[in-house]
Amino acid sequence: MTAPAVELLQFMDMELKKENQQAERERARVWLNYLVNVFTQPSMGKEDPKFAMAKKEFIESIKPEQKKGQAKVYEYDFELMKRLKASQEGGG
């Protein structure tokens, strides 16, 4: 096979993978919209306990994560690293 044909096949394969990824994202978007519509409908009368639990789990799963407190800040100890490196080189 010639080089341009191989490159063309690789390009076609890359485009096909890209289209498949876009289709998968679209399917996920449609599914999420469906779930949102189902779980946000107002309940008329008494709600099924299993449905209520599923609704609660769904809401928890799509909530953005809440950071608790401030992020921990680490300080880099350059002197310790120099001593460790020196001991490894000297005792290596």
Image (spheres, helix red, strand yellow):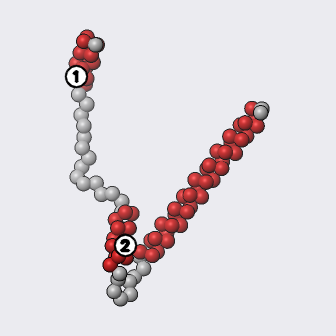
Q: Which quadrant of the figure contains the C terminus?
A: top left
Residue placed under numbered mark 1 in the picture: 79
Residue 82 shown left or right of residue 48 in the figure: left
Q: Secondary structure at mark 1?
A: helix
Q: Amino acid at mark 1?
A: Glu
**The one of 46 and 69 positioned closer to us in this rendering:** 46
In the rendered image of this protein, does residue 27 appear above or below residue 13?
A: below
Q: Secondary structure at mark 2?
A: helix
For image coordinates 76% across by 37% down, the residue present is 5
Residue found at the far bottom of this picture: 45
Number of labelled discs? 2
**The one of 40 and 53 positioned closer to us in this rendering:** 53
Q: In the figure, residue 86 lies in which quadrant?
A: top left
Q: Which mark is residue 55?
A: 2
Residue 33 shown left or right of residue 3 in the figure: left
Residue 53 in percent (x, y) is at 33, 73
Q: In the figure, residue 87 lies in which quadrant?
A: top left
In the rendered image of this protein, does residue 75 appear above or below residue 18?
A: above
Residue 67 shown left or right of residue 17 in the figure: left
Badge 2 crowding class, 10 Å Cα cut-off, few under 14, some 14 to 19, many 20 or more, is some
For image coordinates 24% across by 37% down, the residue present is 74
Q: Amino acid at mark 2?
A: Lys
Residue 34 shown left or right of residue 42 in the figure: right
